[in-house]
Amino acid sequence: MPLPTLFEQLQQLVALPSVSSYSDKWDMSNRPVIERLAEWLTALGFTCEILEVPDTEGRKCNLVATLGQGPGGLVLAGHTDTVPYDDFQWQSDPFQLTEADDRWYGLGATDMKGFFPVAIEAAREFVDAKLQQPLIILATADEESSMSGARALAQLGYPKARYAVIGEPTGMVPIRMHKGIMMEKIRIEGLAGHSSDPSLGNNAMESMHQVISELMQFRQQLQQQYHNPGFTIPGPTLNLGCIHGGDNPNRICGHCELEFDLRAIPGMDNDELRQRIDQQLERVAEQTGSKILRQTMFGGVSAFEESANSALVKSAERLTGNNAESVAFATEAPFLQQLGMETIVMGPGYIDQAHQPNEYIPLDHLKPAVTALKGLIRQLCL
């Protein structure tokens, strides 16, 4: 059976819903996407392994598709899930790939189902070649939520290769650095009571006021301590995202919750940051008498940096004509780097199209992306 065209491949991938979300209302299996990719890659001669993500009852899977053998090689990696969508804001069906204005529109067209047909098209030239090192196409689960797919691979220590390209939309600019991210929730339990007599309770919102002051001072300390001119925003950021507390104006607030994120730069450690935050929370708890708990909302992603002089960075710069840069968003790169690979982030499309209604991938990005990936395969696998 002949392989579908690049358009037909993306059309089929977009038509298979694979939203990942912390909300059960939205969360879906990515297995149909994984199985479709495995079908195409097996037909090309790849050896395909579908690896179920632990504790997901087979709903979430990774795919490792390998062409050739050897201890090194190149991984072309992407995630198969998308974010939730607002269909009423789309001008077309999010699950029907539509061509208009030299663009292909569809949910995940650029972030990042569109990378897989590009990677497969690049790989087709080498299916009959005698590869000296393997070519691996890697497809993961749940990057948009928990990153459980990449975490599972890091825990397995698999796959092994020397180089990895993650095809997130960067306009084919090689990305060698990005910030990390951690999302935390702080819960404060005070004591409710009649507001006419503050001594009857312990106002959790007032305790949270002190916590917020501590976090804002902590943010200032971090930005004074850490600075990397390679980023547009050179220091770490801490965003107070949402707050909820109390139940009535005439009751002392008995409970309050705050959610925030912290985006570290390379050289900072998420676990160490959590420890420093916990120390601040302990001080506020002692001062206020409130019970204060911090909860990590998901495992977080470490900041990522690949050497500017690495062979992969230099090859990608030569092939694309673009100098390596940095981005503020997080990717699966740290997990592949943990497996011992030189890693970059580079793919067609623009990140400002990600997570948006009417998401699209520009058609003029596809051929240069295929050409660049072919160049990397030729250099690193032949």
Image (spheres, rainbow, N blue to C red):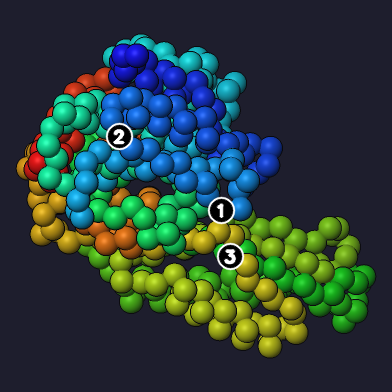
Amino acid under label 2? Phe
Identify the residue under disc 1: 54
Q: What is the C-alpha distance between the residues marked 2 and 1?
A: 24 Å
In depth, the one of 239 and 116 nearer the eye is: 116
> What amino acid is found at the position of numbered circle 3 in the picture?
Thr
Q: Nearer the viewer, mark 3 or mark 2?
A: 2
Q: How far across and how far down the image is residue 164, in percent?
A: 25, 49
- Residue named by callout 3: 296
Q: Give residue 154's quadrant in the image.
A: bottom left
Q: Earlier in the sequence, mark 1 or mark 3?
A: 1
Q: Residues within 10 Å of mark 1 (few under 14, many from 20)?
A: few
Badge 3 marks a residue whose secondary structure is: strand
Is residue 141 at least partly visible in the picture? no
Which tag is nearer the camera, tag 1 or tag 3?
1
Label 2's element?
Answer: loop
Quadrant containing the C terminus in the rendered view? top left
Of the pair 342 and 245, the residue shown nearer to us: 342
Q: Name the residue at 16% across, 28% down.
A: 128
Up the image or down, 323 lies above or below 94; here it is below
Where is residue 271 shown, x and y percent of the image? 47, 73
Left or right of residue 286: residue 120: left
The image shows residue 315 at horizontal and vertical percentages of: 10, 46
| Mark 3 Cα-neighbour bin, 10 Å: few <14, some 14–19, many ≥20 | few
Say whether residue 296 is visible.
Answer: yes
The residue beneath circle 2 is 46
Residues under labels 3 and 2: Cα distance?
39 Å
